Image: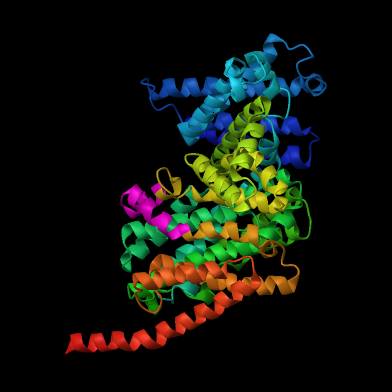
């Protein structure tokens, strides 16, 4: 019964989203409230009460009643929309039914968030609400305007300032159709085909399985929108293969966790975050995509080099040639499934609307799936894709809606101005101190909650400050987003590391620690594009070329420092020397950067020419 209801709601949600976006003229807030109603209702059915001691039928009855209530509140909103649209906040009258419908929507959204994301984000929302209500009675800088519970409900339910704000609007109008597109490709079999192509390409290098993990996880992560799901999908193949070739269980899990999390920063879709960043910065999606290219390439280059150096340190061998899938056969069997991905990228970069790009690509994906028997999107597969989409969207919708509630509390109390003032006074005139404070705040707040709400909350407080310091708007938002992403794999929470540890059959904290060591070098990259904004714009070209060569050299230097290996194991004093040279490579001054390049090349060749013969002599003595 429960599974049939899940399928019914998931398919209805998909049809409603498609018709409301493309064929039926609904107002934006009507689409958003329907989106939220479906998400919360599906959450109750997909994630039943755990601590309720009743029988399964009793749990189902409770969940069905709760799902019915949220649907009723959503339908009431749509029916009363003409009145709601003309409502004057805190001036127009509010009926008891308005308060009940709004209260049910807010409370059930928080309960849905608790079920799919656990307590951290829900508790933060409750604390924010507590501060909002208690603010008038607090002393000094903590005091705020008075507001009643009814006014709080009105503020969130009748306006776009909170629950139904920009984030949930982005989820409803952009994110859903892209997640549906990704689910259709996944159900049609693109994942395994794409994995075979990557293995045939990267498996022939030393430490091949780890490099397969880096490439596949990054590429899948950009469209799935869920790093944990990405770990579960790609990690189920790459982690056992890494263990089999000699990597420790915790290291194998760490590579997968870091690479899957980094899918959130991979353009063009950035795990669907590109739409939210575009909304918050009021810029074209293509501008965000172009700006994110070089930082993402640097991040994956760093991770790839670290894996390569670790493989060299452990004397890893490539995957045996006879065990590699054929590149030609893999491409021949899966080429038709890659065309929709190429189409959607081209359309987005050429300025087509995200909705049109997604719809056109979905239609192409369904048509092309019938070219091969095994990839055909039959009715059952389409239903499965709708269910998969619905389950993913329950997480995204709950997270963005609850983050909207938190933001409504922050903005109403004026807390963002108080925190902004504190950051400015603490940093003084130092941009470096300011970005350090913001990085720490983004990282800490990102613990225990998804990337999108962490980014939303921190960016509304800190991005304007960075802009006032002369940092470009897109740069400021990408800086916050990068550090929010890094909390996905670092202890004590690190949800991606927990999933990877389960697959690797090892401790989550050990996996998280290894992931933090792997990803710590990536902390440099957001600072790089703050101090070298040319990395985001590619212009002027001569400045870009002057900066990119030292930066790439520095990325290699960071990998050497973290791994402690270059052409051999490095001594402590050598690692310290590399740290000093790498600082030169990342300097805002081009002359200092290029002096660092020269020093780095000299040190590299000294190590290669001087020390390798000595190691060979040592081996000869040991052999004799």
- Residue 80: x and y, percent? 76, 19
- Residue 332 visible in image: no
Q: Residue at x 72, y 30 (%)?
A: 160
Q: Quadrant of residue 168?
A: top right
Q: Residue at x 42, y 65 (%)?
A: 562
Tell me if residue 479 comes above or below residue 91 in the rendering: below
Point out the image quarter for the C terminus: bottom left
Left or right, 361 with respect to 402, comes to right
- Residue 337: x and y, percent? 61, 62
Left or right, 354 with respect to 264, comes to right
Nearest the viewer among 490 and 203 is 490
- Residue 214 visible in image: yes
Tell me if residue 103 comes above or below residue 36 in the rendering: above
Left or right, 57 with respect to 95, comes to left
Nearest the viewer among 559 and 280 is 559
Magenta part, dominant SS: helix
What kind of colouring is applied to the model shown? rainbow
Q: Is residue 500 magenta?
A: yes
Determine the residue located farthest toward the left in the rendered image.
624
Q: Quadrant of residue 14?
A: top right
Stretch of the chain drawn in magenta: 498-520
Q: Is residue 613 magenta?
A: no
Tell me if residue 333 comes above or below residue 260 in the rendering: below
Q: Residue at x 81, y 22 (%)?
A: 82
Nearest the viewer among 130 and 598 is 598
- Residue 65: x and y, percent? 54, 19
Q: Quadrant of residue 317?
A: bottom left
Q: How many marks?
A: 0
Left or right, 317 with respect to 369, comes to left
Q: Residue at x 40, y 70 (%)?
A: 575
């Amino acid at each position: 019964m429960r599974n049939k209801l899940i399928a019914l709601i998931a398919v209805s949600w998909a049809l409603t989203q498609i018709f409301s976006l493309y064929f039926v003229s609904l107002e934006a807030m009507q689409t958003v409230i329907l989106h939220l109603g479906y998400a919360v209702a599906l959450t109750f059915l997909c994630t039943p009460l755990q601590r309720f001691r009743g029988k399964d039928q009793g749990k189902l009855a409770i969940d069905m009643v709760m799902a019915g209530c949220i649907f009723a509140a959503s339908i009431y909103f749509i029916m009363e929309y003409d009145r709601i649209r003309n409502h004057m906040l805190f001036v127009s009258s509010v009926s008891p039914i308005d308060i009940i419908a709004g209260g049910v929507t807010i409370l059930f959204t928080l309960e849905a968030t608790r079920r799919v994301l656990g307590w951290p984000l829900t508790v933060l929302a409750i604390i924010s609400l507590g501060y909002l209500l208690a603010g008038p009675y607090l002393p000094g800088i903590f005091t705020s305007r008075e507001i009643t519970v009814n006014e709080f409900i009105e503020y969130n339910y009748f306006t776009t300032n909170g629950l139904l704000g920009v984030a949930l609007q982005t989820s409803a109008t952009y994110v859903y159709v892209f997640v549906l597109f990704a689910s259709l490709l996944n159900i049609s079999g693109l994942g395994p085909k794409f994995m075979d192509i990557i293995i045939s390409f990267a498996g022939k290098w030393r430490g091949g399985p780890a490099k397969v993990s880096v490439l596949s996880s990054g590429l899948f992560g950009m469209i799935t929108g869920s790093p944990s799901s990405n770990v579960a999908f790609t990690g189920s193949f790459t982690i056992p293969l890494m263990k089999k070739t000699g990597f420790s269980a915790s290291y194998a899990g760490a590579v997968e966790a870091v690479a899957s999390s980094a899918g959130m920063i991979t353009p063009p879709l950035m795990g669907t975050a590109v739409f939210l960043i575009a909304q918050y910065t009021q810029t074209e999606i293509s501008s965000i995509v172009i700006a994110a290219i070089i930082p993402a390439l640097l991040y994956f280059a760093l991770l790839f080099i670290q894996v390569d150096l670790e493989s060299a340190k452990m004397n890893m061998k490539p995957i045996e040639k006879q065990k590699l899938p054929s590149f030609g056969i893999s491409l021949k069997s899966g080429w038709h499934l890659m065309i929709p991905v190429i189409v959607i990228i081209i359309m987005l970069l050429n300025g087509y609307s995200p909705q049109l790009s997604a719809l056109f690509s979905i239609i192409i994906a369904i048509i092309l799936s019938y070219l091969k028997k095994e990839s055909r999107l039959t009715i059952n597969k389409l239903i499965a894709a709708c269910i998969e989409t619905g389950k993913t969207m329950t997480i995204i919708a709950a997270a963005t809606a609850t983050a909207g509630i938190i933001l409504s509390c922050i903005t109403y109390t004026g807390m963002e101005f108080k925190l902004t003032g504190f950051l400015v006074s603490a940093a003084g005139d130092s941009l470096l101190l300011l970005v350090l404070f913001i990085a720490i705040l983004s990282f800490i707040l990102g613990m225990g909650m998804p990337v999108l709400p962490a980014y939303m909350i921190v960016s509304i407080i800190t991005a304007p400050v960075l802009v006032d310091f002369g940092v470009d708007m897109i740069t400021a938002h990408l800086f916050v987003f990068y550090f929010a992403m890094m909390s996905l794999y670092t202890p004590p929470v690190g949800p991606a590391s927990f999933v990877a540890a389960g697959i690797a059959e090892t401790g989550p904290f050990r996996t998280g620690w290894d992931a933090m060591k792997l990803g710590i070098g990536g902390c440099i990259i957001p600072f790089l594009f703050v101090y070298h904004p040319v990395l985001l714009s590619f212009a002027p070209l001569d400045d870009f070329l002057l900066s990119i060569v030292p930066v790439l050299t520095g990325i290699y230097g960071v990998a050497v420092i973290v791994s402690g290996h270059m052409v051999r194991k490095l001594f402590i004093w050598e690692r310290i020397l590399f740290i000093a040279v790498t600082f030169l490579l990342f300097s805002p001054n081009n002359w200092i950067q290029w002096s660092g390049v020269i020093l780095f090349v000299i040190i590299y060749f000294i190590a290669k020419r001087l020390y390798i013969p000595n190691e060979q002599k040592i081996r000869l003595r040991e052999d004799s």
